[in-house]
Image (cartoon, helix red, strand yellow):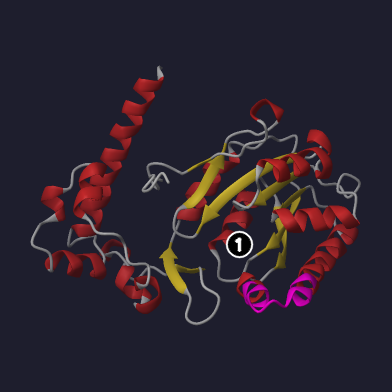
Amino acid sequence: MSMDEQIKQAAEVLDAHTAEMIKWHFSPETGSPFWLDWANKQDWNPLEEVATFSDLCEKFPNFQDEWLRDLPNEVWVPQAYKGRPFNIFETGGTTGMPKQRIGWDDFRIDYSAFSETLSDEHFPRNHYWMMVGPTGPRRLRLAIEHLANERGCSCYFVDLDPRWVKRLIASKQFDQARAYMDHAVDQALTILKHRSVSALFTTPKLLEALAERRDLIKAGIKGVFCGGTTMDKQYARFLVEEVCEGGKIGFVPTYGNTLMGLARHHPIGPENDYSIAYYAPQPRAVLRVIDPD
C-alpha cells in the first residue's frame, strides 16, 4: 500500500470513528449530561452537522480544560454507563484542585495494543516489573500494572509525587528536590536488591540516577520504558549507549498523558540519529499542528 493510500485509509477510519463518537455522546440514549446539555444550548445539531473529523474541528470550540477541575465527575458519565463505577484520574497542576477525568477500559485498550510492540527478549513474560514514578491517582499506575499483567508479569511500585517536585523546583529548593529523588532511588534499589526484576518503567532522570548507583544489567534488568518528552537526541543517545550499554538493555521511550492515552514511538538508534518521534493512538486521539512557528 502506497503512502497516499495509507493516508486515505487513515482519514476514512478517523472520519468513521468521529461519526461514531458524535452519535454516542449526543444521543439521549447514550450521551453524558454535560454534552447533552451543551448541545441543547447551541443553535446547531452535532448529530446532523458533524460527519467527519474536519466537521468536528470546524464546528466545535476548543475544549475548556478547567471544566475538568470545576465540574463534578458525574456530568461526564454517559447514559449507557450510568451506575457503572468508574476510575478517576488526575492530570496537571501543582497546587489546588487538580483536573480530573473519568474512565473505564481505555487504559487497558491502549496498553494491550502497546504490549504487541514489545519483544520477549527485553520484556520477558511471566516475570516481575518495577515502576518508579507517579502512581497514586494517575492513569499511568493502572496502565503499567495492566501492561505487566498482559504479559503475565506482576509489578512493584515506588511512588513519586510530581506536584511536590514542581513545588520544590518553583520555590528553588533544589537540594530538597534532589533529596526527594534520592529517596525514590533508595527505595527502588532496595527492591532490586531483594527481588528479581526484569523490566523497569521510570523517568529519564531517575533511570540515570539508578544507573549511577547500580549496574542495571547485573541487577537483572533486560528492558526499560522511559516516559516523557524531555529527551533530546543527545540525551537519548546517552541513555541507549551508556546506561543501557548499547542495546544490551532494551530501551523503549514512551509518551502518554491522562487525556490522550499512550503514544507509540518510532525505533531509535544511530540510523535516525537517536531522534524520538511519538505517534498518537489514532483514531482515539489525534495530534494537529496549530501553529508551526
Instruction: Kindly identify the residue that appears in the image at 62 percent across and 36 percent down.
Output: 275
Query: Which residues are drawn in magenta?
Result: 166-178
Instruction: Kindly identify the residue that appears in the image at 18 percent across and 43 percent down.
Output: 51
Residue 62 placement: quadrant = bottom left
Dot 1 amino acid type? Arg
The image shows residue 17, relative to residue 64, as above or below, that is above
Instruction: Kindly identify the residue that appears in the image at 86 percent across and 61 percent down.
Output: 189
Q: Nearer the viewer, residue 179 or 128?
A: 179
Residue 82 x/y as whole percent: 31, 68
Q: Residue furthest front?
A: 293
Q: Residue furthest bottom?
A: 96
The image shows residue 279, relative to residue 8, as above or below, that is below
- 10 Å crowding of disc 1: few (<14), some (14-19), many (20+): some
Residue 104 placement: quadrant = bottom left
The N terminus lies in which quarter of the figure?
top left
The image shows residue 185, relative to residue 262, as above or below, that is below
Residue 186 placement: quadrant = bottom right
| Image mark count | 1
User: Which residue was labeled with disc 1?
Assistant: 141
Can residue 125 be seen by looking at this rendering? no
The dominant secondary structure in magenta is helix
Residue 245 x/y as whole percent: 84, 38
Q: Nearer the viewer, residue 293 or 238?
A: 293
Asked if residue 174 is among those painted magenta in the image, a careful observer would answer: yes
Can residue 190 be seen by looking at this rendering? yes
Instruction: Kindly identify the residue that appears in the image at 57 percent across and 50 percent down.
Output: 255
